[in-house]
Image: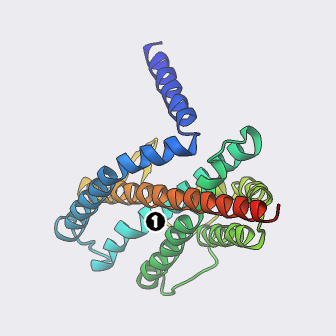
């Protein structure tokens, strides 16, 4: 009962924060204050994670040095999915609740998520070559991750092709929500089909990875997550400012034509 009340309280506080930041002016003020701290935190955690990964994590008796690709590949793959999930949630907020910053958040996250997914595909190919003997196979996990990358590109193309923000946001939001069906396919592909890709090492039934590998992996994941937050906030700020400038220019044109 106490845990339920705590969770309810946290959700209510989070909802209050989201409502408070719905105002673009408040968001700009809040993000300006928090960004320096997030930048410092992400830099510290990433440097510490790289130190652990390179100097403390042991080599694998089969994979040798190549096993350390996982410290980039796993966070990139995880964040590629998480960012898309964020975009899907923001798209729902835009379609249903018309949150003023929802489509801004979705649009700003697109290129970051695309880069994370692309790096996951590249590092996975580099890791797969010594393990599978080839850079690419049409495996269920690899193919669904490639589909995710194409979804990112498609959403960015929609935003570029449609000049009107509201129309572009609505079209992109619909595609983002429909495309979210790919996320559980990526997650459970190694379970549903015969896959060359190894299954998850961290699952409810237990952890099948040694702490010497797990610790730097989690630190790197945290560092890249903080980096995403920094990049996302900066991209959102740039988009808000761009829309303000466009609105000012439009008002000037309207006044000049009167």
Seen as rendered, the residue at the extreme bottom is: 134
Residue pictured at 33% horizontal, 73% vertical:
67
Would residue 26 be found to the left or right of residue 157 on screen?
Answer: left
- Image quarter hosting the C terminus: bottom right
Residue that extends furthest to the left in the rendered view of this protein:
55
Residue 128 is left or right of residue 110, and the answer is left
Residue for point 51% across, 87% down: 134
Q: Residue at x 81, y 65 (%)?
A: 257
Where does residue 104 sit, x and y in percent of width and height? 62, 54
Camera-side residue of 224 and 216: 224
Observer able to see residue 192 = no
Q: Residue at x 47, y 55 (%)?
A: 233
Percent position (x, y) of residue 215?
27, 54
Residue picked out by circle 1: 76
Position of residue 156 in the picture relative to residue 42 (left or right): right
Q: How many marks?
A: 1
Figure check: 70 above or below 237: below
Where residue 174 sits: x, y (%)? 78, 55
Judge whether 230 appears above or below 138 on screen: above
Q: Residues within 10 Å of mark 1 (few under 14, many from 20)?
A: many
Q: Secondary structure at mark 1?
A: helix
Looking at this rendering, what residue extends furthest in the right direction? Answer: 258
Residue closer to the observer: 171 or 241:
241
Placement of 78 over or under 102, stated as above or below: below
For the rendered model, the colour scheme is rainbow
Q: Position of residue 137 (x, y in %)?
A: 59, 81
Task: Give the quadrant of residue 44.
Answer: bottom left
Of the pair 85 and 58, the residue shown nearer to us: 85
In this view of the protein, can residue 126 be seen by the observer? yes
């Amino acid at each position: 009962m106490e845990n339920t009340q705590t969770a309810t309280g946290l959700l209510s506080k989070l909802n209050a924060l989201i409502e408070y930041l719905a105002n673009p002016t408040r968001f700009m003020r809040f993000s300006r204050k928090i960004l320096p701290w997030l930048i410092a935190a992400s830099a510290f955690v990433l440097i510490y994670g790289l130190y652990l990964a390179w100097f403390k994590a042991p080599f694998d008796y089969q994979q040798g040095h190549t096993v350390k690709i996982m410290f980039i590949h796993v966070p990139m793959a995880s964040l590629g999915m998480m960012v898309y999930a964020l975009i899907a949630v923001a798209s729902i907020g835009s379609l249903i609740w018309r949150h003023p910053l929802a489509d801004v958040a979705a649009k700003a996250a697109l290129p970051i998520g695309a880069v994370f997914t692309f790096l996951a595909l590249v590092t996975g190919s580099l890791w797969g070559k010594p393990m599978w003997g080839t850079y690419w196979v049409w495996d269920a996990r690899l193919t669904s991750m490639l589909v995710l990358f194409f979804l990112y590109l498609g959403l960015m193309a929609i935003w570029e092709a449609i000049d009107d923000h509201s129309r572009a946001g609505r079209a992109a939001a619909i595609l983002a929500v429909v495309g979210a069906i790919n996320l559980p396919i990526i997650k459970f592909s190694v379970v549903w089909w015969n896959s060359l890709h190894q299954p998850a090492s961290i699952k409810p039934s237990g952890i099948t990875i040694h702490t010497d590998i797990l610790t730097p992996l989690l630190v790197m994941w945290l560092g890249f997550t903080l980096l995403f937050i920094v990049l996302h906030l900066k991209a959102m700020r740039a988009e808000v400012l761009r829309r303000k400038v466009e609105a000012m220019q439009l008002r000037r044109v309207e006044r000049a034509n009167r």
